Amino acid sequence: FHAFDHARHFLNASKRILGLTYESLVGGLIGVRHRGTRVLVSVSNVSVEADAIGALTTLPSVIDGAEALRKKHAGRSIISGIAVAQRLSGVSYKLLAFERLLIDYPVWHSKVVLLQRCLIPGTRRVDEADTLREVRHLVKRIQDRFGPEVIDYDEQVGSVYPVDDRLSIWMASRVMMHAPIREGLNLCPLEYIFVKGSSGRDGDEPGVVIASEFAAVSSILNGALRVNPYDIQMCVTSIDSALSMSLDEREARKGRDIDFVSNSPSGLWTRNVLRDLNDATLEGSKLEAIGEASPDTVLAREAELCLERLDPPSLEAAYSSTRTRVFIIDFNGTLVVKEPAGKYLKREILGTSGFRPSAATCLALQRLCSDRRNTVYVVSGDSQANLEAAMGGVPGLGLAASNGTCFSDPGSGGGGTDGEKRVWQYLEFGVDWAAVKKVAMPIISKFTARTNGSYVKLSHSSIGWSYYSCDPEWGSLQASHLVTELGEALRGFDVRFVALKGIVEVVPRNGHKGHIVKNILERVKAREGDVDFVLCMGDDIADEKMFTSVINFSAQSQGDSSYAFNVAVGKKPTNASFYVDSASDVGDILVGLSGDREMYMRQQSQASESSVDFS
């Protein structure tokens, strides 16, 4: 990126859309980890091609053009500007400021002229037509009041102004005003500084740049006068200061920028980016060789490198050769894709509400549940009501909600079982939730009111505050303050705080998904004598306790031919032994295990067709 403002927008988008956070690297670099790969975010400024522009300024057409402008506006100081005729270029605000200058400072009536050129690229026709109509109206109004000599206005079709004409304008101008209300990198102010600061011709003096604080160049140029285009009076004062500025101050302002402007061509910018990439690569190699900071980090990275992609044929072979099987599957992010949240959408329910697995996945679950050798549970951090609404219609499916603090066994009603209502059981951890809510809710309500997009999530044994739909930085800041304030208020209760992606939860100190997984496995073992096949799948940090419980249970198993498959959705540091890429892969696996080969092949065919590029 050319400016940190742009890099910050990218980091915010990465956090909002992908849930990624950045890390600081040696040398001031920024890294973002995505799917096991470190993405380098580099910020480096670029200037104009000084050698080429220096050669062009010696051309007779440029010199003659500048002289013609000086003669045309003899006795007047030229304020120049070249902009696209679109609203974001801020030409109308510049004209309003110039009009106010002539009103408030009558002394400049006969001493100044605004030389404005507007480009019409034709890329946004409605915007350009509206902007040109407004600009022409303002130009006519100013000329009618103060005379045609105060504005030299012209329009040109195209997106680039001819370079020789552009350099002639810079050479003849005393002030260059660049006032967009939103813009990326525009090299015209840098070009102006170079032309005015490096010519060395007799009579040429340094110019002054007035730059909008919303333009990328405002963070690059140290000698420019920064203005807010919306603040007309501020712009008027800056124009007057630029026109009245002494030669010594103009020289000093030029000195702040001329070295960078003259010695930072695109070739150097490219080399800087490649250098940063090389430094980050070398640093990554060192970290892999000698370890980073702590043994835990090294072990996590090694585990990520050793993680294998799940092989469906091997899984199906193990499934076919066993007789007592347990399936434990996370819901949000594993069976269904997490819902992308709108930025300012207020909700009272989780992002998965209303979302269900595909029809093929639901049918596969139903077929697996109908096999008496299988015990299938869906475990979720969502509320009991939401989980039952989404998955309660699958006959024979066990459900565990609120991270396993409440559960409904297979065959306990629901799912079309003679119209019976599901029977739910609850794990108690010795926490008086009525008292916890009485203390916590006033605090959480205060943070919800001040954080747009946040909402409260209540379940049997937890209180959650979700900021997934909020501005990422503001939401994270409020979450950190909320945890601090709740920690003080709930110090006397046996609870802890869990910070997941976009949510803070108050849960029992000993409550997590691992307890319900251990409970399920031990009850199936007591009923059947042993468990020789376990498939556990999850996607986030809350599911790591499930993987740990499966590992501990397998270590105590007496069977010689038992299988345990811990599968993470997405490749990352995890306690799982295998991974799949996405929730759609989980559905394909369940369809394959259910024995419906025709449906499995049809899903594979549809997936391959959807990836075809029709462009």
Image: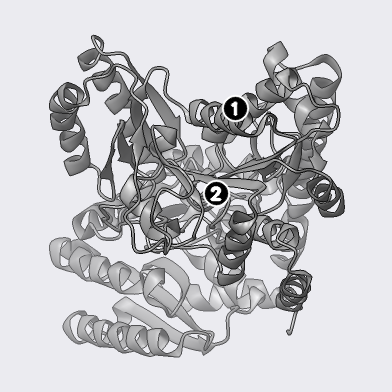
Q: Nearer the viewer, residue 132 or 334?
A: 334
Badge 2 crowding class, 10 Å Cα cut-off, few under 14, some 14 to 19, many 20 or more, is some
10 Å crowding of disc 1: few (<14), some (14-19), many (20+): few
Residue 577 image offset from top left, x and y in percent: 76, 34
State the image coordinates of residue 46 (x, y, percent, origin top left).
Answer: 66, 50
Instruction: Tell me the SS state at disc 1.
Output: helix
Residue 213 shows in this picture: no
Residue that badge 1 annotates: 526
Q: Amino acid at mark 2?
A: Ser
Across and down, in percent, residue 152 comes to 39, 81
234 to 363, vertically: above or below: above
Judging depth in this view, the residue of 197 and 466 nearest the camera is 466
- Mark 2: secondary structure: helix
Q: Which quarter of the figure has residue 449?
A: top left
Q: Amino acid at mark 1?
A: Ala
- Residue at 30 percent of width and 77 percent of height: 150
**Identity of the residue drawn at 22% across and 60% down:** 232
Alpha-carbon span between mark 2 and mark 1? 47 Å
Q: Residue furthest top?
A: 492
Label ID, residue 14: 2
Left or right, residue 410 beside residue 132: right
Q: Is residue 318 left or right of residue 568?
A: right
In the depicted view, which residue is nearer to us: 137 or 357? 357
> In the rendered structure, which disc, 2 or 1, sits on the residue that comes first in sequence?
2
Left or right: where 170 falls relative to 462: right
- Left or right: 318 with respect to 365? right
